Image: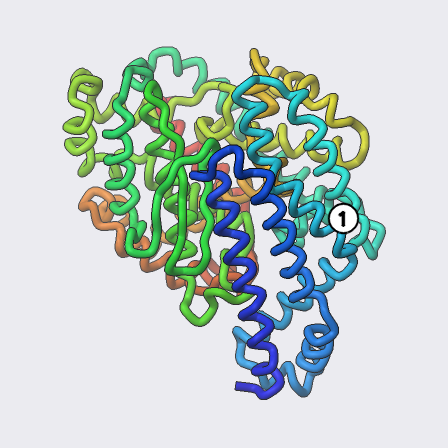
Amino acid sequence: MNEKYEKLIPHLNKMMALETALTLLQWDTETLAPVEALENTAKAVGLLSGEYFDAMVNDDIKNLLHELSKPENFDVLEFNEQKIVKKLNKQLKEMECIPPEEYKAYSELTAKSSAIWATAKEKNCFADYAPTLEEIVSYNKKFASYRNEENKALYDIMLDEFEEGIDMKQLDEFFAKLRTAIVPLLKQVVAKSDSIDKSYNSLTYDIGKQKEFCKFIAEYIGFDFRRGVIAESEHPFTTNLHNKDVRITTHYFKNNLESSIFSTIHEGGHAIYEMNIDDSLTQTPVGHGSSMGVHESQSRFFENIIGRSIDFWAPLWDKLTNTFPEQLKNVSLDQFILSINKAEPDFIRTEADELTYSLHIMIRYEIEKLLISGQIEVSDLPRIWNEKYEEYLGIVPPTDTLGVLQDVHWSNGTFGYFPSYALGNAIASQIYAFIQTKIDFSKCLREGNLNPILDLLKEHIHKYGATKNTNELLLEMTGESFNADYYVAYLIDKYTKLYQL
């Protein structure tokens, strides 16, 4: 190991230790912690965040990175070491412009905000949440302005954090392409959707049995319970301490069977990615997914391309019907497949079908642009949200719980994240097209053998962590950079066949 790089290791270890502690506190707050713990936990998060800031932004780190970035030193580093140095330089640049006291205060705020959001959602009271959200928006705009050296739009600065190199111009073109393809197809599909009976889904399903089945399905797709756990939270999510401790959550509804199953498969896709990151990268600044778009491609690949196919469910159908014999006694596999792929406008993004899903994302994208640019205020959000749902989906949420309060993301300050969901869908379709040229995809699913699929994902995507960006991964895997045409073709082919259009 390079002598200068070796001096960096103790600093990396300290940063990773603090990051691990913060991750555990976040996990605990959103899953098991009692409500009364929130205030004191937030103080602890603030102090630990301050320590993390100091561990990241100090003269020792700056001097080491300066030396390691010199060509004569950088060129002799190993590939992974070079990527870590580059990542640290980027993180340092982003953090050192933020006053430490503001970083600490913001960390305390976001430590409390998810619980405030969850309570407001439960009470259907946006007014209870609005002051906290106003603070979060203010901090995010301020932090983006600190990092804005090239006089870019603040929202472009935020987008770059989640998908490096992607800006509003590119996203506007991307969503325009999806609008052109999806809206006409959706109209054709919705015209035939009324004939699909999915009343079975709203029958009463025992929560205990749902938990058992979700544990089974997670393991079936490749989730390793020796290195992961499943818990419950208001909004399902995935987090990890390292590749041997990856945690997912889901939410169970007694009158919605599909919800917990598909959120488990979705979060399982995220988790399998993290579990397969190479040991040499885990617990380093590049020991996580390449980007939010690539990460979403894995969750959506598992949830939709695998999880909503008849080939996947054929070997599992007896297991599901034996778990819920009364509720599913009159449901055939073919009916179930049509049901889980039924396309119709609805209020909840996480429950949305593949055709309408990107419209949900487009709404959030357009709202974030308006909010961050100052064209609207936080107080305008319920009204703007409902207007856009009526414009794009033809429906108006009857409550804020089903509308502007449904997502946790803004509570965490993740402005610019939502577009990654739509990008993830498109990337997943491009990966799917490639995998089909390498193996008999349908046969693997029909035989209940996902290993060949998992092996290809690990070999071409997972093991690299964040050492390669989206286009590098896609170019090396598929021979071309990001191409949304695969997504459009996938949707048209799938729904044309399903609905016999």
Residue at 28% across, 17% down: 204
Examine the image and state in which quarter residue 376 appears. top right
Residue 61 spot, x, y in % from top left: 68, 73
Label 1: few (<14), some (14–19) or many (≥20) C-alpha neighbours in 10 Å: many
The mark total stands at: 1
Q: Which residue is mark 1?
A: 144
Residue 26 spot, x, y in % from top left: 52, 46
Q: How is the image coloured?
A: rainbow
Residue 246 spot, x, y in % from top left: 40, 53
Residue placed most toward the observer, 404 or 99: 99
Residue 382 as seen in the image, left or right of residue 243: right
Residue placed most toward the observer, 393 or 267: 267
Examine the image and state in which quarter residue 409 appears. top right
Residue 95 as seen in the image, left or right of residue 234: right
Residue at 50% across, 56% down: 289
Kindly tell me whether residue 421 is visible in this rendering: yes
Residue at 80% across, 52% down: 146
Residue placed most toward the observer, 223 or 340: 223
In this rendering, the answer to whether 224 lies above or below 381 is: below
Residue type highlighted by circle 1:
Ala
Residue at 54% across, 70% down: 13
Kindly tell me whether residue 500 is visible in this rendering: no
Examine the image and state in which quarter residue 62 appears. bottom right
Q: Residue furthest right?
A: 151
